[in-house]
Image (cartoon, rainbow, N blue to C red):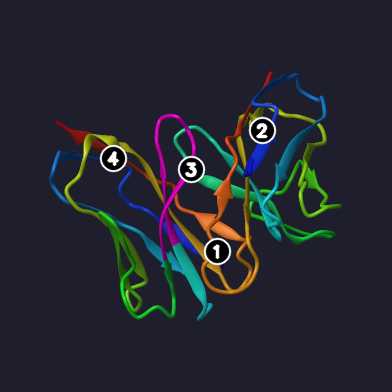
Amino acid sequence: NAGVTQTPKFQVLKTGQSMTLQCAQDMNHEYMSWYRQDPGMGLRLIHYSVGAGITDQGEVPNGYNVSRSTTEDFPLRLLSAAPSQTSVYFCASSGSGGGFNEQFFGPGTRLTVL
Amino acid sequence: AQKITQTQPGMFVQEKEAVTLDCTYDTSDQSYGLFWYKQPSSGEMIFLIYQGSYDEQNATEGRYSLNFQKARKSANLVISASQLGDSAMYFCAMREGQWASKIIFGSGTRLSIRP
């Protein structure tokens, strides 16, 4: 069981470039989310998904796109990178249903936009 | 809209003392869940404890307990007998309603344990 995996671990982009951050989980979780964490701050929700084919915006969605074609994968696309998107990006997943569901986090992707 | 507030940016505590990390929340939903996570300097997010809005008892997990005061909308984390390894960032988070995927985090408290 690999849990939640993210690739790449580190990435440097130039302003205006696009790229996709990959996230995969092997726990058959319905729910997946993307967060960004800026230095010294908490996590802010970018986009989330409650199942394959269903996504919704979080607190800071601008500049990012997501899709969920399978239960396992939830890629995050940066359309035109800006220095303000320099951050650490975390993907997370959790099971469905009401009540308590622990959210499992990936190790993070550290992105720098020059 | 839901909101999580952590008013202590940083705290210093002597080893073996108990420590309370504050968290207040705002929501109009009757059904919600509250979480605490630890983030050591290595960067990973470690789940500590969960409290559901309908749980009558305060949640406990080993040295961690959650002091849940629903009327005051507070969910403070209490760490008993602090250890050097407890030095880390601590985040309070809330899930509003049944959609477990939408979880909002506070800005965090940096806890430093002095030997």
Q: CA distance from mark 1 to mark 2?
A: 29 Å
Q: Above or below — where is A87 with respect to A67?
A: above
Q: Foreground mark, 4 or 2? A: 4
Q: Nearer the viewer, residue A85 or B63?
A: B63
Q: Above or below — where is A42 with respect to B64?
A: above
Q: Quadrant of the N terminus of chain B?
A: bottom right
Q: Which residue is mark 1?
A: A101
Q: Position of residue B5 (x, y in %)?
A: 40, 57
Q: Secondary structure at mark 1?
A: loop
Q: Secondary structure at mark 2?
A: helix
Q: Which residue is mark 4?
A: B86
Classify residue B12 as left or right of residue A109. Answer: left
Is tag 1's residue or tag 2's residue first in the polypeptide sequence? 2
Q: CA distance from mark 1 to mark 4?
A: 24 Å
Kindly identify which chain the residue marked by label 4 belongs to.
Answer: B
Magenta highlight on residue A103: no
Amino acid type at circle 3 is Met
Amino acid type at circle 1 is Asn
Q: Do callouts 4 and 3 point to residues on the same chain?
A: yes
Q: CA distance from mark 2 to mark 3?
A: 21 Å
